[in-house]
Image (cartoon, grey):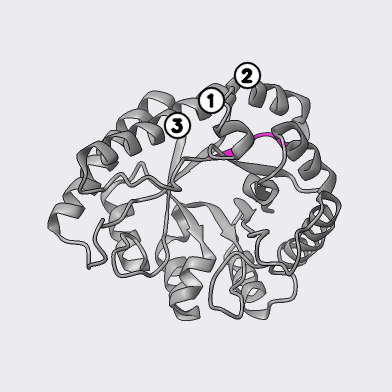
């Protein structure tokens, strides 16, 4: 049986204690705490507050963590950008250890130019992964790299590329973003599961919208529900983390409306896995 969670970024505008309250009220089992959740990030990352939220919501433990990524790039051609990006990722892993998080999701980075990744880009990626391995060994935290959207300068957008990295790095895990894979094709989703299912510890769950973009609700989307059914048929036992963009709706959702939507999504998740 899976563990059903949601990204804290769905409650982008709320305080951390409100976010924990709302997710608990929705009936979900856990949450993925984005370090860049605004109430946490812009106030200097007060870790004691997050520890307090976790202690006050034992029904949501253990949580997972998503390392900072929004305007960072550990494979940047700019060495200062690359270095601070790596350091933020390392600090997220160390924070995860301190707060008792089970998994940290990290992004692989990308080529700075809108061109196919080249040998120097992959070299920077290897350096980044080596540093993550060191801190993973020190902390004992599971580090899971995420497959990315299929863009020209993306690293790790295909099942074959991800499988190659996982084979080379036996300590590393995968956060499988099903929406990113579906942007390639439904067949690509199957290839990810064929090649990587044993290394998946978290699934970012969303459907594609009419614009072909991910982060839409899954409860009435046949393609997304089909992916979940495939995961269930293969016996996937791990985390399933809803990633929903609250900006896709015609009007801003209230907290109550967001809770109701998550409850509907939870029903769909349970129907797929029970």
Q: Is mark 1 on a helix, strand or loop?
A: loop
* In the depicted structure, whether residue 186 falls above or below residue 234: below
> Left of 178 or right of it: where is 168?
left
| Res 44 label | 1
Percent coordinates x, y for residue 100 in the rendering: 58, 27
Front position in the image: 246 or 86: 246
Residue range corresponding to the magenta coloring: 60-65
Percent coordinates x, y for residue 83 in the rendering: 27, 35
Of tags 2 and 1, the one toward the viewer is: 1
Q: Does the magenta stretch include residue 152?
A: no
Contact (Cβ within 8 Å) of mark 2 with mark 1: no
> Left of 240 or right of it: where is 180?
left
For mark 3, does the 10 Å Cα neighbourhood hold few (<14), some (14 to 19), or many (20 or more) residues? many
Q: Is mark 3 on a helix, strand or loop?
A: helix
Q: Mark 2 points at which residue?
A: 48
How many numbered markers are drawn?
A: 3
Contact (Cβ within 8 Å) of mark 3 with mark 1: no
For marks 3 and 2, give the CA distance.
Answer: 16 Å
* In the depicted structure, whether residue 40 falls above or below residue 151: above
| Res 93 label | 3
Q: Is mark 2 on a helix, strand or loop?
A: helix
Percent coordinates x, y for residue 142 in the rendering: 46, 38
- Work out which quarter of the rendered image holds the C terminus and state it: bottom right
Q: Which residue is at the far front?
A: 251
> Left of 107 or right of it: where is 125?
left
Percent coordinates x, y for residue 84 in the rendering: 32, 34
Residue sitting at 62 percent across and 70 percent down?
207
Indicate the quadrant where residue 87 lies: top left
For marks 2 and 1, give the CA distance.
Answer: 11 Å
């Amino acid at each position: 049986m899976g563990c059903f969670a949601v990204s804290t970024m769905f409650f982008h505008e709320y305080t951390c204690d409100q976010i924990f309250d709302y997710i608990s009220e929705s009936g979900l089992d856990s949450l993925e705490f984005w370090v860049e959740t605004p109430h946490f990030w812009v106030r200097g990352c007060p870790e004691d507050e997050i520890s307090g939220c976790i202690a006050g919501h034992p029904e949501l433990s253990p949580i997972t963590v998503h390392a900072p990524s929004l305007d960072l790039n550990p494979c940047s051609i700019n060495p200062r950008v690359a270095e601070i990006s790596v350091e933020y990722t390392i600090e997220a892993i160390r924070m995860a250890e301190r707060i008792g998080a089970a998994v940290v999701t990290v992004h692989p980075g990308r080529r700075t130019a809108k061109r196919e990744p080249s040998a120097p880009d992959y070299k920077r990626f290897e350096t980044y992964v080596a540093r993550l391995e060191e801190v993973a060994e020190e902390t004992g935290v599971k580090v899971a790299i995420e497959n990315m959207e299929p863009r020209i300068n993306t690293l790790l957008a295909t099942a074959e590329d991800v499988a190659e990295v996982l084979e080379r790095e036996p300590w590393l895990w995968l956060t499988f973003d099903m929406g990113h894979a579906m942007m390639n094709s439904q067949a690509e989703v199957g290839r990810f599961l064929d090649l990587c299912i044993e290394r998946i510890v978290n699934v970012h769950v969303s459907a594609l919208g009419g614009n072909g973009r991910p982060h839409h609700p899954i409860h009435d989307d046949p393609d997304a529900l089909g992916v979940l059914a495939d995961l269930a048929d293969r016996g996937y036992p791990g985390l399933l983390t809803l990633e929903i963009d609250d900006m896709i709706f015609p009007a801003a959702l209230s907290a109550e409306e967001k809770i109701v939507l998550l409850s509907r999504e939870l029903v769909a998740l349970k129907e797929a896995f029970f």
